[in-house]
Image (cartoon, helix red, strand yellow):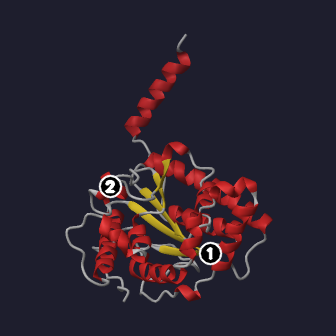
Amino acid sequence: MPRVGRNLSAREAPVFEAVQSQYLVPFDGSFNVGEAPTAPEDGPDKKKATNALRKRIKKMRHLQDMLYAQNEWSVLLVFQAMDAAGKDGTIKAVMSGINPAGCQVHSFKKPSENELDHDFLWRTTIRLPQRGQIGIFNRSYYEEVLVVRVHPKILMGQQLPFIPPGDTVWDQRLKSIEDHELHLARNGTVVLKFWLNVSKEEQRNRFLARIEEPEKNWKFHPADVAERGHWDDYMLAYEETLQSTSRSWAPWYAIPADDKPYMRLAVADVIVRSLESLGLAYPTVSATERAELQMWGHQLETEE
């Protein structure tokens, strides 16, 4: 059973609160994966969506500049999805206007031996963004309650001294993730999580394109087809994960992924409005500092 989010007092709650969206996963555990759309009901055409995305990117560039200069907040963008949903392409398209000096992307695949010598949150924790930075996780610690849940034999190789019986291990990990994200939020990290919700039929079409189009052959992996056999198990794992960890301080957004231009616009819109909600501003200087700046300016203007 999903865990309903705890009620935090005003004193306990982080400053950041999720911006509203039709794709915001509710915080009360009521999310139903079967009711989540994989395509927009009435979205803009490709040209309009692309133009709108360009405008969001321009806004994001300015907001990132203030985020970096203010050096108080950090932003963590988490992307999870089934294979071929478009995580890589979305990150590339949405973040195309961002200053790379203030942004880092990390992809998480099979854990290394060194990573397995630590708790399951360690390898992502050491890659969290510092203040003023945007960090992007292409897959994340959520793999530990998604892929590992669908393939529980993976637990046998994680060198754990004890594995709780039944679903207890997943409940414990979901609770650890919720506590982890609350800690981040209380310390100034804005956590935005995007589940790119692709349909099984659209995934099939994209796999076929990877086989049929030479420039996409490198993307195809036979194991991806094998994973389709676990589709229902993955949907169940995603449903409970999103139910249990979508919180006002670390929201999930279930974004329709069958229409790539619309998906990218929807993601960019949430990011821009979330940044705008922070009240970012360039640092100001005191009267004394202003006078000193003017002195240095005068010296530079009059030097021979």
Above or below 185: residue 64: above
Picture quadrant where residue 146 is located = bottom left
Point out the residue furthest to the top here.
304
Q: Give the Cα separation between the discs numbered 2 and 1.
A: 30 Å
Q: Position of residue 30 (x, y in %)?
A: 46, 89
Instruction: Kindly identify which numbered label has been placed on residue 115.
Output: 2
Q: Are marks 2 and 1 in contact (CB under 8 Å)?
A: no
Residue 224 against residue 89 in the figure, above or below: below
Say left or right for 56 vs 270: right
The answer to whether 99 is drawn above or below residue 152 in the figure is above
The quarter of the picture where residue 187 lies is: bottom left
Q: Is residue 257 visible?
A: yes
Tell me the quarter of the picture where residue 179 sits: bottom left
Mark 1 residue type: Val
Mark 2 Cα shell of 10 Å, populated few (<14), some (14-19), many (≥20): some
Instruction: Determine whether the residue tagged by mark 2 lies in a helix, strand or loop.
Output: helix
Q: Which residue is mark 1?
A: 198
Please state, as top left, top right, bottom left or bottom right, where the C terminus lies in the image.
top right
Name the quarter where the N terminus is drawn.
bottom left
Q: How many marks?
A: 2
Please give the name of the residue rendered at 37% of the width and 75% of the height, measured from the top-left corner. 152
Amino acid found under the numbered disc labelled 2: Glu
Residue 71 on image: x %, y % = 41, 49
User: Which residue lies at the image location 38% right of the left edge and 54% below the top edge?
Assistant: 128
Please say whether residue 10 is visible from this viewpoint.
no
| 186 in relation to 255, above or below | above
206 to the left or right of 273: right
How far across and how far down the image is residue 54, in percent? 70, 57
9 vs 245, nearest the viewer:
245
